[in-house]
Amino acid sequence: MGKAILILMAEDDAEDRMLVQDAWTESRLANELRFVKDGEELMDYLRGRGAWSAPGVAPRPDLILLDLNMPRKDGRECLEEIKGDPALRLIPVVVLTSSKAEEDIVRSYHHGVNSYITKPVTFDKLVETVRALGKYWFEIVTL
């Protein structure tokens, strides 16, 4: 395969971050997975601000996994900012959220999300989802 891909996940729930990391490990994905805890931190990371301002601390992600429901700045606002910024809009964004609301799905696609996935309820289903994500984004798609 090619070079390892950097995935940046914006997720405010510590337990969900841990479950995704465990599913990532269980799926044996070699790509680097980093986390930010909310939309403000995501945008700071992407723009190299604050804690992310030192050179090399915040390499550009190849894929963003985005929760919609986060404090300070939610994923909906982040998606609009990312896809509205010429410097960031080409980064693929996959919404990974608990929301099944049709309004969230339609709005996300309207604002340029590349995929919308509802978080699975069980760990086994999460592992399946992470494997499918890995297969599609890291083996099939050219980033």
Image (cartoon, grey):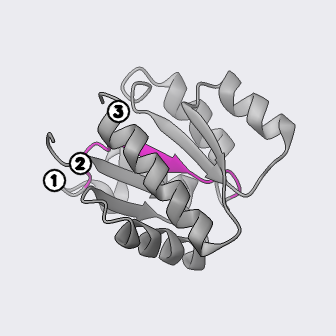
Residues in magenta? 58-69
Tell me which residue sits at (23%, 48%) in the image.
Answer: 59
Q: Are marks 1 and 2 in contact (CB under 8 Å)?
A: yes
Amino acid at pointer 1: Gly
Sequence order check, earlier mark of 1 and 3: 1
Quarter of the image for residue 28 reads bottom left
Residue for badge 2:
59
Asked whether 101 or 86 is in front, the reply is 101
Q: Residues within 10 Å of mark 3 (few under 14, many from 20)?
A: few
Residue 123: percent from left, percent from top = 59, 74
Amino acid at pointer 3: Ile
In the picture provided, is 101 more to the left or to the right than 18?
A: right
Residue for badge 1:
56
* Residue 6, magenta (yes or no): no
Residue for badge 3:
140
User: Which secondary structure type mostly characterizes the magenta part of the structure?
Assistant: loop
Amino acid at pointer 2: Pro
Asked whether 88 or 55 is in front, the reply is 88
Tell me which residue sits at (65%, 40%) in the image.
Answer: 77
Q: Are marks 3 and 2 in contact (CB under 8 Å)?
A: no
Residue 41: percent from left, percent from top = 47, 57
